[in-house]
Amino acid sequence: MTQPLLSLSALTKAYPGVVANDSVSLEIGTGQIHALLGENGAGKSTLVKMIYGLVKPDSGTMQMNGTPFTPPEPRAARAAGVGMVFQHFSLFDAMTVAENIALGMENAPKLSALSAQITEVSEAYGLPLSPDRIVGDLSAGERQRVEIIRCLLQEPKLLIMDEPTSVLTPQEVEILFKTLRKLSAEGTAILYISHKLEEIRTLCDHATILRLGKVVGECTPRDTTAREMAEMMVGKLLQTPTRSGQSAGDTVLTLKNLSAPAPNAFGMALKDICLDLRAGEILGIGGVAGNGQDELLAALSGERPVARGMITYKGTDIGSQGPTPRRKAGLLTAPEERMGHAAAPDMSLTENAMLTGAARMGLDKGGFLDWPAARTFADAIIAKFDVRTPNASSAARSLSGGNLQKFVIGREVMQSPDVFIVNQPTWGVDASAAADIRQALLDLAQNGTALIVISQDLDELMEISDRFAALNEGGLTAPRPAQGITVEEIGLMMGGAHDMEVAHV
Protein backbone atom coordinates (compact mmCIF):
# COMPACT_ATOMS: atom_id res chain seq x y z
CA MET A 1 0.00 0.00 0.00
CA THR A 2 1.27 3.49 -0.89
CA GLN A 3 0.73 6.41 1.48
CA PRO A 4 -2.34 5.47 3.51
CA LEU A 5 -5.47 7.58 3.41
CA LEU A 6 -5.87 7.35 7.19
CA SER A 7 -3.09 6.47 9.62
CA LEU A 8 -3.60 5.94 13.36
CA SER A 9 -0.55 5.79 15.59
CA ALA A 10 -0.62 4.66 19.24
CA LEU A 11 -4.12 6.00 19.92
CA THR A 12 -5.07 5.62 23.57
CA LYS A 13 -8.32 6.44 25.34
CA ALA A 14 -9.08 5.55 28.96
CA TYR A 15 -12.22 5.88 31.05
CA PRO A 16 -12.53 5.32 34.82
CA GLY A 17 -11.81 1.66 35.40
CA VAL A 18 -11.12 0.71 31.79
CA VAL A 19 -8.67 1.43 28.97
CA ALA A 20 -10.92 1.42 25.90
CA ASN A 21 -8.06 1.77 23.39
CA ASP A 22 -4.48 0.95 24.31
CA SER A 23 -1.88 2.26 21.82
CA VAL A 24 -3.90 1.31 18.73
CA SER A 25 -2.21 1.72 15.35
CA LEU A 26 -3.61 0.90 11.91
CA GLU A 27 -3.60 2.16 8.34
CA ILE A 28 -6.41 2.33 5.78
CA GLY A 29 -5.57 2.76 2.11
CA THR A 30 -7.52 4.67 -0.53
CA GLY A 31 -10.29 2.45 -1.87
CA GLN A 32 -9.61 -0.27 0.70
CA ILE A 33 -12.49 -2.07 2.45
CA HIS A 34 -10.96 -2.56 5.88
CA ALA A 35 -12.70 -4.63 8.57
CA LEU A 36 -12.42 -3.72 12.25
CA LEU A 37 -13.09 -6.84 14.31
CA GLY A 38 -13.34 -7.53 18.01
CA GLU A 39 -15.60 -8.97 20.66
CA ASN A 40 -17.97 -6.74 22.61
CA GLY A 41 -16.00 -4.26 24.67
CA ALA A 42 -12.86 -4.65 22.54
CA GLY A 43 -12.76 -0.92 21.80
CA LYS A 44 -14.17 -0.72 18.26
CA SER A 45 -16.79 1.93 19.04
CA THR A 46 -14.36 4.16 20.92
CA LEU A 47 -11.86 3.95 18.06
CA VAL A 48 -14.31 5.00 15.35
CA LYS A 49 -15.69 7.74 17.60
CA MET A 50 -12.18 9.21 17.79
CA ILE A 51 -11.90 9.10 13.99
CA TYR A 52 -15.31 10.76 13.66
CA GLY A 53 -14.61 13.50 16.22
CA LEU A 54 -17.03 12.30 18.90
CA VAL A 55 -14.25 11.40 21.35
CA LYS A 56 -10.86 13.02 21.90
CA PRO A 57 -7.92 10.62 22.31
CA ASP A 58 -5.78 10.87 25.45
CA SER A 59 -2.62 10.29 23.42
CA GLY A 60 -1.48 9.20 19.99
CA THR A 61 -1.88 10.78 16.57
CA MET A 62 -4.02 10.54 13.44
CA GLN A 63 -3.15 11.57 9.90
CA MET A 64 -5.35 11.98 6.84
CA ASN A 65 -3.43 11.93 3.55
CA GLY A 66 -0.19 12.55 5.42
CA THR A 67 -1.38 15.63 7.34
CA PRO A 68 -2.40 15.81 11.01
CA PHE A 69 -6.04 14.92 11.60
CA THR A 70 -7.55 16.03 14.92
CA PRO A 71 -11.31 16.58 14.44
CA PRO A 72 -12.76 18.31 17.53
CA GLU A 73 -16.32 17.39 16.47
CA PRO A 74 -18.13 15.35 13.80
CA ARG A 75 -18.67 18.44 11.64
CA ALA A 76 -14.89 18.81 11.30
CA ALA A 77 -14.51 15.09 10.51
CA ARG A 78 -17.16 15.35 7.78
CA ALA A 79 -15.43 18.43 6.36
CA ALA A 80 -12.22 16.38 6.17
CA GLY A 81 -14.00 13.65 4.23
CA VAL A 82 -15.14 11.18 6.90
CA GLY A 83 -18.73 9.88 6.80
CA MET A 84 -20.31 7.46 9.23
CA VAL A 85 -23.41 5.26 9.09
CA PHE A 86 -24.32 4.34 12.65
CA GLN A 87 -25.82 1.03 13.78
CA HIS A 88 -28.86 2.87 15.17
CA PHE A 89 -30.57 5.11 12.63
CA SER A 90 -31.06 8.79 13.52
CA LEU A 91 -34.14 9.58 11.45
CA PHE A 92 -37.49 11.27 12.08
CA ASP A 93 -40.40 9.01 11.12
CA ALA A 94 -42.86 11.81 10.33
CA MET A 95 -40.53 13.58 7.89
CA THR A 96 -39.70 12.78 4.28
CA VAL A 97 -36.43 11.27 3.06
CA ALA A 98 -35.30 14.63 1.68
CA GLU A 99 -36.17 16.49 4.88
CA ASN A 100 -34.23 13.97 6.98
CA ILE A 101 -31.19 14.22 4.74
CA ALA A 102 -31.33 18.03 4.81
CA LEU A 103 -31.17 17.96 8.62
CA GLY A 104 -27.83 16.17 8.45
CA MET A 105 -26.19 18.59 6.02
CA GLU A 106 -24.21 21.70 6.93
CA ASN A 107 -25.49 23.84 4.05
CA ALA A 108 -28.45 22.01 2.62
CA PRO A 109 -29.77 23.23 -0.75
CA LYS A 110 -33.44 23.86 -1.43
CA LEU A 111 -35.54 20.70 -1.10
CA SER A 112 -36.25 20.61 -4.82
CA ALA A 113 -32.55 20.63 -5.68
CA LEU A 114 -31.74 18.21 -2.89
CA SER A 115 -34.45 15.82 -4.07
CA ALA A 116 -32.89 15.78 -7.52
CA GLN A 117 -29.47 15.02 -5.98
CA ILE A 118 -30.93 12.21 -3.87
CA THR A 119 -32.56 10.64 -6.92
CA GLU A 120 -29.35 10.92 -8.95
CA VAL A 121 -27.09 9.45 -6.25
CA SER A 122 -29.52 6.70 -5.27
CA GLU A 123 -29.81 5.53 -8.87
CA ALA A 124 -26.07 5.81 -9.52
CA TYR A 125 -25.24 3.55 -6.56
CA GLY A 126 -28.05 1.04 -6.92
CA LEU A 127 -29.96 2.26 -3.85
CA PRO A 128 -33.36 3.23 -5.28
CA LEU A 129 -35.14 5.64 -2.96
CA SER A 130 -37.82 8.29 -3.46
CA PRO A 131 -36.97 11.61 -1.74
CA ASP A 132 -40.67 12.29 -1.12
CA ARG A 133 -41.46 9.14 0.87
CA ILE A 134 -42.22 9.42 4.58
CA VAL A 135 -39.46 7.70 6.58
CA GLY A 136 -41.99 6.01 8.85
CA ASP A 137 -43.26 4.07 5.83
CA LEU A 138 -39.80 2.72 4.93
CA SER A 139 -38.41 -0.73 5.67
CA ALA A 140 -35.24 -1.03 7.75
CA GLY A 141 -33.21 -1.57 4.59
CA GLU A 142 -34.64 1.57 3.00
CA ARG A 143 -33.91 3.57 6.14
CA GLN A 144 -30.31 2.48 5.93
CA ARG A 145 -30.23 3.75 2.35
CA VAL A 146 -31.26 7.16 3.64
CA GLU A 147 -28.28 7.20 6.03
CA ILE A 148 -25.89 6.02 3.31
CA ILE A 149 -27.11 8.53 0.73
CA ARG A 150 -26.81 11.31 3.31
CA CYS A 151 -23.14 10.36 3.64
CA LEU A 152 -22.58 9.95 -0.12
CA LEU A 153 -23.88 13.44 -0.82
CA GLN A 154 -20.89 14.70 1.16
CA GLU A 155 -18.54 12.76 -1.18
CA PRO A 156 -16.58 11.08 1.65
CA LYS A 157 -13.03 9.83 1.31
CA LEU A 158 -13.62 7.41 4.20
CA LEU A 159 -16.97 5.81 5.01
CA ILE A 160 -17.35 4.14 8.44
CA MET A 161 -20.11 1.51 8.68
CA ASP A 162 -21.14 0.02 12.03
CA GLU A 163 -23.03 -3.30 11.81
CA PRO A 164 -24.65 -2.28 8.50
CA THR A 165 -26.38 -5.59 7.72
CA SER A 166 -27.96 -6.33 11.11
CA VAL A 167 -31.47 -5.44 9.89
CA LEU A 168 -31.20 -6.41 6.21
CA THR A 169 -32.53 -9.34 4.21
CA PRO A 170 -30.05 -11.43 2.19
CA GLN A 171 -31.18 -9.61 -0.95
CA GLU A 172 -30.63 -6.20 0.65
CA VAL A 173 -27.18 -7.28 1.85
CA GLU A 174 -26.19 -8.10 -1.73
CA ILE A 175 -27.41 -4.68 -2.90
CA LEU A 176 -25.39 -3.01 -0.15
CA PHE A 177 -22.25 -4.97 -1.02
CA LYS A 178 -22.53 -3.97 -4.70
CA THR A 179 -22.75 -0.35 -3.58
CA LEU A 180 -19.72 -0.63 -1.31
CA ARG A 181 -17.66 -2.33 -4.03
CA LYS A 182 -18.56 0.47 -6.44
CA LEU A 183 -17.51 3.08 -3.88
CA SER A 184 -14.27 1.20 -3.29
CA ALA A 185 -13.54 1.08 -7.02
CA GLU A 186 -14.04 4.86 -7.16
CA GLY A 187 -11.47 5.35 -4.40
CA THR A 188 -13.60 5.66 -1.26
CA ALA A 189 -12.09 3.80 1.68
CA ILE A 190 -14.51 1.89 3.91
CA LEU A 191 -13.97 0.98 7.56
CA TYR A 192 -16.41 -1.87 8.14
CA ILE A 193 -17.49 -3.14 11.56
CA SER A 194 -19.50 -6.37 11.72
CA HIS A 195 -19.83 -9.55 13.76
CA LYS A 196 -20.92 -11.47 10.64
CA LEU A 197 -17.59 -12.99 9.73
CA GLU A 198 -18.66 -14.71 6.51
CA GLU A 199 -19.69 -11.27 5.25
CA ILE A 200 -16.25 -9.96 6.20
CA ARG A 201 -14.66 -12.77 4.17
CA THR A 202 -16.85 -11.95 1.18
CA LEU A 203 -16.42 -8.18 1.21
CA CYS A 204 -13.26 -6.97 2.94
CA ASP A 205 -9.69 -6.64 1.69
CA HIS A 206 -8.01 -6.50 5.08
CA ALA A 207 -8.93 -6.88 8.75
CA THR A 208 -7.55 -5.51 12.01
CA ILE A 209 -8.50 -7.41 15.17
CA LEU A 210 -8.89 -5.73 18.57
CA ARG A 211 -9.03 -7.49 21.92
CA LEU A 212 -9.37 -5.66 25.24
CA GLY A 213 -8.47 -2.38 23.56
CA LYS A 214 -5.28 -3.61 21.84
CA VAL A 215 -4.50 -4.65 18.28
CA VAL A 216 -3.85 -8.40 18.51
CA GLY A 217 -3.61 -9.28 14.83
CA GLU A 218 -4.29 -8.57 11.19
CA CYS A 219 -5.36 -10.84 8.36
CA THR A 220 -6.63 -11.07 4.81
CA PRO A 221 -10.23 -12.21 5.36
CA ARG A 222 -10.63 -14.18 2.14
CA ASP A 223 -7.62 -16.29 3.15
CA THR A 224 -8.83 -16.79 6.75
CA THR A 225 -11.75 -18.86 7.98
CA ALA A 226 -14.54 -17.31 10.02
CA ARG A 227 -13.62 -19.57 12.94
CA GLU A 228 -9.97 -18.47 12.78
CA MET A 229 -10.99 -14.80 12.86
CA ALA A 230 -13.42 -15.42 15.72
CA GLU A 231 -10.74 -17.19 17.74
CA MET A 232 -8.31 -14.32 17.13
CA MET A 233 -10.99 -11.97 18.46
CA VAL A 234 -11.65 -13.88 21.69
CA GLY A 235 -8.22 -15.45 22.24
CA LYS A 236 -9.54 -18.97 22.73
CA LEU A 237 -11.04 -21.91 20.88
CA LEU A 238 -14.76 -21.55 20.13
CA GLN A 239 -17.31 -24.12 21.16
CA THR A 240 -20.05 -25.01 18.67
CA PRO A 241 -23.54 -24.94 20.23
CA THR A 242 -24.90 -28.46 20.70
CA ARG A 243 -28.20 -30.01 21.69
CA SER A 244 -29.17 -33.56 22.46
CA GLY A 245 -32.06 -34.92 20.42
CA GLN A 246 -35.40 -35.03 22.22
CA SER A 247 -39.05 -34.94 21.26
CA ALA A 248 -41.28 -32.00 22.08
CA GLY A 249 -43.68 -32.28 25.01
CA ASP A 250 -47.21 -31.03 25.57
CA THR A 251 -48.57 -27.82 24.09
CA VAL A 252 -47.98 -24.92 26.50
CA LEU A 253 -48.88 -21.88 24.39
CA THR A 254 -51.62 -21.54 21.77
CA LEU A 255 -52.31 -18.55 19.56
CA LYS A 256 -55.70 -18.63 17.86
CA ASN A 257 -56.48 -15.96 15.26
CA LEU A 258 -54.29 -13.49 17.15
CA SER A 259 -55.10 -10.09 15.69
CA ALA A 260 -54.39 -6.57 16.89
CA PRO A 261 -54.49 -3.13 15.27
CA ALA A 262 -51.27 -1.28 14.54
CA PRO A 263 -50.08 0.53 17.70
CA ASN A 264 -49.38 3.73 15.76
CA ALA A 265 -49.30 5.19 12.26
CA PHE A 266 -45.99 3.47 11.51
CA GLY A 267 -46.66 0.15 13.24
CA MET A 268 -47.94 -3.16 11.85
CA ALA A 269 -51.28 -4.81 12.55
CA LEU A 270 -51.25 -8.49 13.51
CA LYS A 271 -53.47 -10.63 11.30
CA ASP A 272 -54.97 -13.98 12.36
CA ILE A 273 -51.79 -15.56 13.73
CA CYS A 274 -52.31 -19.18 14.79
CA LEU A 275 -49.82 -21.67 16.23
CA ASP A 276 -49.21 -24.22 18.95
CA LEU A 277 -45.93 -24.17 20.88
CA ARG A 278 -44.80 -27.30 22.71
CA ALA A 279 -42.53 -27.76 25.71
CA GLY A 280 -38.91 -28.32 24.75
CA GLU A 281 -39.15 -26.99 21.19
CA ILE A 282 -37.70 -23.90 19.55
CA LEU A 283 -39.86 -22.15 16.95
CA GLY A 284 -37.77 -19.77 14.85
CA ILE A 285 -39.59 -16.81 13.31
CA GLY A 286 -37.87 -14.90 10.52
CA GLY A 287 -38.92 -11.83 8.59
CA VAL A 288 -37.81 -8.48 7.25
CA ALA A 289 -37.75 -5.82 9.98
CA GLY A 290 -41.06 -4.01 10.40
CA ASN A 291 -43.37 -6.91 9.53
CA GLY A 292 -44.86 -7.30 13.01
CA GLN A 293 -42.00 -8.62 15.14
CA ASP A 294 -42.29 -5.95 17.84
CA GLU A 295 -46.08 -6.09 17.80
CA LEU A 296 -46.10 -9.89 18.21
CA LEU A 297 -43.72 -9.74 21.17
CA ALA A 298 -45.81 -6.96 22.79
CA ALA A 299 -48.94 -9.12 22.52
CA LEU A 300 -47.16 -12.14 23.99
CA SER A 301 -45.49 -10.19 26.80
CA GLY A 302 -48.74 -8.58 27.94
CA GLU A 303 -47.66 -5.04 27.04
CA ARG A 304 -50.61 -4.94 24.63
CA PRO A 305 -53.66 -6.88 25.86
CA VAL A 306 -55.66 -8.70 23.18
CA ALA A 307 -59.20 -10.06 22.91
CA ARG A 308 -60.29 -13.10 24.85
CA GLY A 309 -59.50 -16.49 23.32
CA MET A 310 -56.47 -15.37 21.29
CA ILE A 311 -53.66 -16.41 23.70
CA THR A 312 -53.88 -19.51 25.88
CA TYR A 313 -51.04 -20.44 28.24
CA LYS A 314 -51.18 -23.85 29.94
CA GLY A 315 -54.92 -23.98 29.35
CA THR A 316 -55.61 -20.50 30.76
CA ASP A 317 -56.68 -17.49 28.71
CA ILE A 318 -54.10 -14.77 29.37
CA GLY A 319 -54.99 -12.24 26.67
CA SER A 320 -56.08 -9.61 29.21
CA GLN A 321 -53.19 -10.20 31.64
CA GLY A 322 -50.30 -7.74 31.92
CA PRO A 323 -46.59 -8.61 31.98
CA THR A 324 -46.28 -9.22 35.75
CA PRO A 325 -48.81 -12.07 36.11
CA ARG A 326 -47.47 -13.66 32.92
CA ARG A 327 -43.96 -13.54 34.36
CA LYS A 328 -45.08 -15.06 37.64
CA ALA A 329 -46.67 -17.90 35.68
CA GLY A 330 -43.42 -18.53 33.75
CA LEU A 331 -43.93 -16.73 30.42
CA LEU A 332 -40.91 -14.44 29.95
CA THR A 333 -39.90 -12.19 27.05
CA ALA A 334 -36.90 -10.17 25.89
CA PRO A 335 -37.55 -7.36 23.38
CA GLU A 336 -35.28 -6.27 20.55
CA GLU A 337 -34.67 -2.74 21.81
CA ARG A 338 -32.17 -3.10 24.64
CA MET A 339 -31.80 0.46 25.82
CA GLY A 340 -35.05 1.91 27.09
CA HIS A 341 -37.23 -1.16 26.60
CA ALA A 342 -35.33 -4.19 27.89
CA ALA A 343 -33.29 -2.05 30.29
CA ALA A 344 -33.68 1.34 31.97
CA PRO A 345 -30.58 3.30 30.85
CA ASP A 346 -29.89 5.27 34.03
CA MET A 347 -30.64 2.45 36.45
CA SER A 348 -27.89 0.18 37.72
CA LEU A 349 -27.63 -3.44 36.65
CA THR A 350 -28.89 -4.42 40.10
CA GLU A 351 -31.97 -2.25 39.63
CA ASN A 352 -32.51 -3.65 36.13
CA ALA A 353 -32.26 -7.17 37.52
CA MET A 354 -34.97 -6.24 40.01
CA LEU A 355 -37.27 -4.85 37.29
CA THR A 356 -38.03 -8.21 35.69
CA GLY A 357 -36.68 -10.65 38.29
CA ALA A 358 -38.72 -9.60 41.32
CA ALA A 359 -41.68 -11.87 40.57
CA ARG A 360 -39.82 -15.15 39.94
CA MET A 361 -36.62 -14.70 41.93
CA GLY A 362 -38.19 -13.74 45.28
CA LEU A 363 -36.68 -10.25 45.23
CA ASP A 364 -39.68 -8.66 46.97
CA LYS A 365 -40.88 -9.83 50.35
CA GLY A 366 -43.96 -8.52 52.12
CA GLY A 367 -44.05 -5.46 49.88
CA PHE A 368 -40.37 -4.60 50.44
CA LEU A 369 -37.64 -4.91 47.82
CA ASP A 370 -34.76 -7.20 48.80
CA TRP A 371 -31.80 -5.30 47.38
CA PRO A 372 -29.06 -7.65 48.65
CA ALA A 373 -30.82 -10.53 46.88
CA ALA A 374 -31.15 -8.40 43.74
CA ARG A 375 -27.43 -7.62 43.87
CA THR A 376 -26.65 -11.33 44.22
CA PHE A 377 -28.88 -12.07 41.20
CA ALA A 378 -27.21 -9.34 39.12
CA ASP A 379 -23.74 -10.60 40.08
CA ALA A 380 -24.74 -14.12 39.02
CA ILE A 381 -25.89 -12.87 35.60
CA ILE A 382 -22.65 -10.91 35.13
CA ALA A 383 -20.53 -13.94 36.01
CA LYS A 384 -22.43 -16.58 34.03
CA PHE A 385 -22.82 -14.52 30.85
CA ASP A 386 -19.41 -12.80 30.98
CA VAL A 387 -20.86 -9.28 31.06
CA ARG A 388 -17.92 -6.86 30.83
CA THR A 389 -18.64 -4.22 33.47
CA PRO A 390 -16.85 -2.98 36.62
CA ASN A 391 -19.71 -4.19 38.86
CA ALA A 392 -23.48 -4.49 39.26
CA SER A 393 -23.70 -0.86 40.37
CA SER A 394 -22.83 0.33 36.86
CA ALA A 395 -25.61 2.03 34.94
CA ALA A 396 -27.06 0.08 32.01
CA ARG A 397 -26.12 2.87 29.60
CA SER A 398 -22.44 2.47 30.53
CA LEU A 399 -22.27 -0.99 28.92
CA SER A 400 -21.48 -1.62 25.28
CA GLY A 401 -24.47 -2.78 23.25
CA GLY A 402 -23.28 -6.37 23.15
CA ASN A 403 -22.59 -6.55 26.86
CA LEU A 404 -26.00 -5.10 27.67
CA GLN A 405 -27.54 -7.71 25.37
CA LYS A 406 -25.74 -10.47 27.29
CA PHE A 407 -27.09 -9.06 30.56
CA VAL A 408 -30.67 -8.79 29.27
CA ILE A 409 -30.73 -12.33 27.87
CA GLY A 410 -28.98 -13.74 30.92
CA ARG A 411 -31.45 -12.04 33.25
CA GLU A 412 -34.35 -13.90 31.62
CA VAL A 413 -32.59 -17.24 31.05
CA MET A 414 -31.57 -17.46 34.71
CA GLN A 415 -35.22 -17.20 35.79
CA SER A 416 -35.88 -20.66 34.28
CA PRO A 417 -38.93 -19.72 32.18
CA ASP A 418 -41.49 -22.27 31.04
CA VAL A 419 -41.97 -20.22 27.85
CA PHE A 420 -39.39 -17.73 26.59
CA ILE A 421 -40.00 -15.39 23.64
CA VAL A 422 -36.97 -13.40 22.50
CA ASN A 423 -36.54 -10.92 19.66
CA GLN A 424 -33.05 -10.65 18.10
CA PRO A 425 -31.17 -12.56 20.83
CA THR A 426 -27.67 -12.07 19.40
CA TRP A 427 -28.07 -8.70 17.69
CA GLY A 428 -24.78 -6.80 17.89
CA VAL A 429 -22.85 -9.38 19.93
CA ASP A 430 -19.57 -10.99 18.93
CA ALA A 431 -19.15 -14.55 17.69
CA SER A 432 -18.18 -15.99 21.06
CA ALA A 433 -21.03 -14.29 22.93
CA ALA A 434 -23.49 -15.26 20.19
CA ALA A 435 -22.45 -18.90 20.53
CA ASP A 436 -22.89 -18.69 24.30
CA ILE A 437 -26.36 -17.15 23.98
CA ARG A 438 -27.46 -19.76 21.45
CA GLN A 439 -26.16 -22.50 23.73
CA ALA A 440 -28.12 -21.00 26.63
CA LEU A 441 -31.29 -21.08 24.49
CA LEU A 442 -30.63 -24.68 23.47
CA ASP A 443 -30.05 -25.61 27.11
CA LEU A 444 -33.40 -24.07 28.06
CA ALA A 445 -35.13 -26.19 25.41
CA GLN A 446 -33.25 -29.26 26.60
CA ASN A 447 -34.68 -28.64 30.08
CA GLY A 448 -38.23 -28.35 28.76
CA THR A 449 -38.66 -24.65 28.09
CA ALA A 450 -40.69 -23.77 24.99
CA LEU A 451 -39.04 -20.98 22.98
CA ILE A 452 -40.01 -18.58 20.23
CA VAL A 453 -36.88 -16.99 18.74
CA ILE A 454 -37.57 -14.02 16.46
CA SER A 455 -34.50 -13.11 14.45
CA GLN A 456 -33.30 -11.65 11.17
CA ASP A 457 -30.21 -13.85 11.32
CA LEU A 458 -31.34 -16.80 9.20
CA ASP A 459 -28.19 -18.81 9.93
CA GLU A 460 -28.97 -18.48 13.62
CA LEU A 461 -32.54 -19.65 13.17
CA MET A 462 -31.51 -22.65 11.10
CA GLU A 463 -28.88 -23.58 13.68
CA ILE A 464 -31.17 -23.73 16.70
CA SER A 465 -34.78 -24.07 15.48
CA ASP A 466 -36.94 -27.17 15.38
CA ARG A 467 -39.57 -25.42 13.29
CA PHE A 468 -39.50 -22.24 11.20
CA ALA A 469 -42.14 -19.69 10.24
CA ALA A 470 -41.98 -16.21 8.71
CA LEU A 471 -43.76 -12.95 9.47
CA ASN A 472 -44.94 -10.93 6.50
CA GLU A 473 -47.13 -7.83 6.83
CA GLY A 474 -48.37 -8.98 10.22
CA GLY A 475 -49.28 -12.51 9.16
CA LEU A 476 -47.45 -15.72 10.01
CA THR A 477 -46.75 -18.55 7.61
CA ALA A 478 -47.50 -22.12 8.63
CA PRO A 479 -44.54 -23.37 10.74
CA ARG A 480 -42.44 -25.98 8.94
CA PRO A 481 -39.71 -28.33 10.15
CA ALA A 482 -36.47 -26.36 10.00
CA GLN A 483 -34.42 -29.34 8.88
CA GLY A 484 -34.13 -29.44 5.12
CA ILE A 485 -35.65 -26.04 4.38
CA THR A 486 -33.73 -24.08 1.73
CA VAL A 487 -32.66 -20.44 1.69
CA GLU A 488 -34.83 -19.94 -1.40
CA GLU A 489 -37.88 -21.28 0.43
CA ILE A 490 -37.13 -19.04 3.40
CA GLY A 491 -36.87 -16.03 1.09
CA LEU A 492 -40.24 -16.82 -0.43
CA MET A 493 -41.83 -17.24 3.01
CA MET A 494 -40.35 -13.94 4.21
CA GLY A 495 -41.58 -12.18 1.08
CA GLY A 496 -45.07 -13.63 1.37
CA ALA A 497 -44.85 -15.17 -2.08
CA HIS A 498 -46.21 -18.54 -0.99
CA ASP A 499 -47.57 -20.54 1.92
CA MET A 500 -49.06 -17.51 3.61
CA GLU A 501 -52.13 -19.37 4.76
CA VAL A 502 -52.85 -18.96 8.46
CA ALA A 503 -51.05 -21.69 10.36
CA HIS A 504 -53.16 -24.24 12.21
CA VAL A 505 -50.59 -26.56 13.72
Image (cartoon, rainbow, N blue to C red):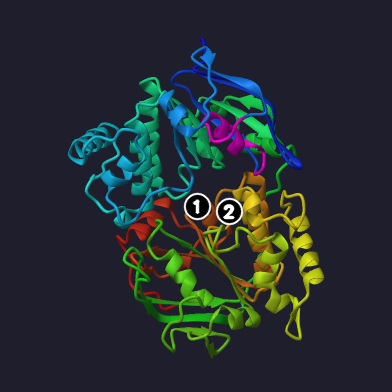
Q: Is residue 32 visible?
A: yes
Residue in view at x 65 percent, y 56 percent = 396
Front residue (pair 245, 427): 427
Front residue (pair 315, 302): 302
Report if the CB atoms under discs 1 and 2 are less than 8 Å apart: yes
Give the image location of residue 201, x and y in percent.
52, 33
Assign a secondary structure to mark 1.
loop
Give the image location of residue 67, x and y in percent.
52, 13
The residue that mark 1 highlights is 457
Name which of mark 1 and mark 2 comes first in the sequence.
2
Instruction: Name above or below for residue 63 compared with residue 458.
Output: above
The amino acid on which the numbered mark 2 sits, given as a three-letter code, is Thr
Residue in view at x 78 percent, y 75 percent = 370
- Residue 426 image label: 2
Q: Quadrant of residue 10?
A: top right
Task: Give the class, few, some or many, for how many residues have Cα within 10 Å of label 1's Cα (few <14, many ≥20).
Answer: many
